Structures are given as C-alpha cells and as structure tokens.
Image: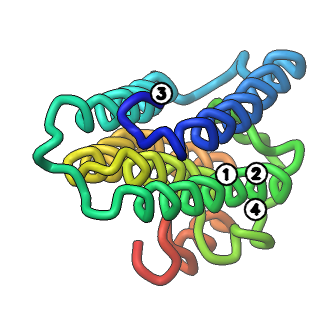
Amino acid sequence: MRGMSAAFSTPYLVSACCWMALEVALALRDLVRWRARHSSDRGTRGIVALSLGGSIFVGVMLRRWLPALDTPVRAAFAGAGLVVFWAGLAVRAWAVVALGGSFRTFVQADVGQAVVTHGPYRWVRHPSYTGLLLIALGIGLGAGNWLSLLVCAAVPALGLLPRIAVEESELARVLGEEYRGYQRRTRRLVPGLW
C-alpha cells in the first residue's frame, strides 16, 4: 500500500488479498445457497462495507496527506499492524467455522437454529465483527500515522453499531429467550468489556 514503508507494503497487500478472498468466498457461498433472499439487514451491510472500506482508504491516504502526524518507529508500527491484522483475520475465520452453515453475510436467522456458544462465541456475541475491527486496526497501525490509526479504529466500529442492533433484534425475535439469555451472559465485541 502506498504510504506505508516499502518493507511492509508487500506483506500488507498479500494480507489484504487473503482477507478479500475470504470475504468473496463467504458472499459466493451465500449466493449459491440463496441465503440472501430473506435478509433482514435493513441496509446495514452497505453501511459496514462503506465504513470499513472508507476508513481503510482514508486511513492509508492520511499518511500521505498529513505526514506531520506520523508515528515514531514506523517499521515497528507496521509489524505490529500485521500481527493485529492477522489476529483479526484468524478471529473472523474462527467465527465462520464455529457457526458453520449458520454463518451468513446477511442478517438472517432460521427458526430452530441453535444459539452457538462455543469457539469465539464463548466470549463475544459477534466475533466476526471483532475480527473486522482488528483487521482495520491493523491497517491503521501499519499506515504509521496517528490520525490513520484513529480513523481505522473508530469509523468501522461506528459502522458496525447499526448492524449489530439489527442483527441482535432479528436473532432475539427468531431465537427467543435462548438468545436473550446468551446476550445477558456475553459481551458484544470485546471480552469482558463491551
């Protein structure tokens, strides 16, 4: 990515390609299974995509636009960013595997669907979104600019808030008290905090 040190641009590009391959595979799986037909996402999928993509683009460009806000020791920030990025990708993939056939890129729940409480769902209700936030945070760290880091940390989180509200409303409506009990026992995105 332009704006990052040359030593870390190739690892970030490879990482981004791996992430995009996962996202494309998930979207294609939904289309093949026709799971998107009865989505209840109320446009929140677009909000998440825009907030995530926009914050990453702006975060990377801020490095060029405001070099006065560069972080010290950019190589260390870039290395830390890659670690956070891959941790996020691992968490997202783990969440997909844990939910199995119930994972969708659209908001949709089936009557009789089990509330999954194993894997990363032991600690948070939306680990796939936690993974997305870590991916964006990793890119913000890698950009090597304080404002980039702030944008990549805050904007995707704000974009996920309406999505989480819609998703939790649908899950509580369809899955009932079992999901509401799960909500009371677990945090949304950050274990033990929120």
- Residue farthest along the left direction in this orientation: 68
Q: Between tags 3 and 4, which lies in front?
A: 3
Looking at marks 4 and 2 on the same chain, the residue that comes earlier in the sequence is marked by 2
Instruction: Give above or below for 4 relative to 116.
Output: above
Residue occupied by mark 1? 89
Q: Between tags 1 and 4, which lies in front?
A: 1
Q: What distance separates the C-alpha of mark 1 from that of mark 4?
A: 23 Å
Disc 3, disc 4: CB below 8 Å? no
Q: Secondary structure at mark 1?
A: helix
Q: Amino acid at mark 4?
A: Val
The label on residue 93 is: 2
Looking at marks 1 and 3 on the same chain, the residue that comes earlier in the sequence is marked by 3
Instruction: Give above or below for 63 relative to 153.
Output: above
Q: Amino acid at mark 1?
A: Leu
Q: Amino acid at mark 2?
A: Ala
Residue occupied by mark 4? 115
Residue occupied by mark 3? 49
Residue at figure coordinates x 80%, y 72% from the top left:
118
Q: Residues within 10 Å of mark 3 (few under 14, many from 20)?
A: some
Q: 139 or 33, which is in the foreground?
A: 139
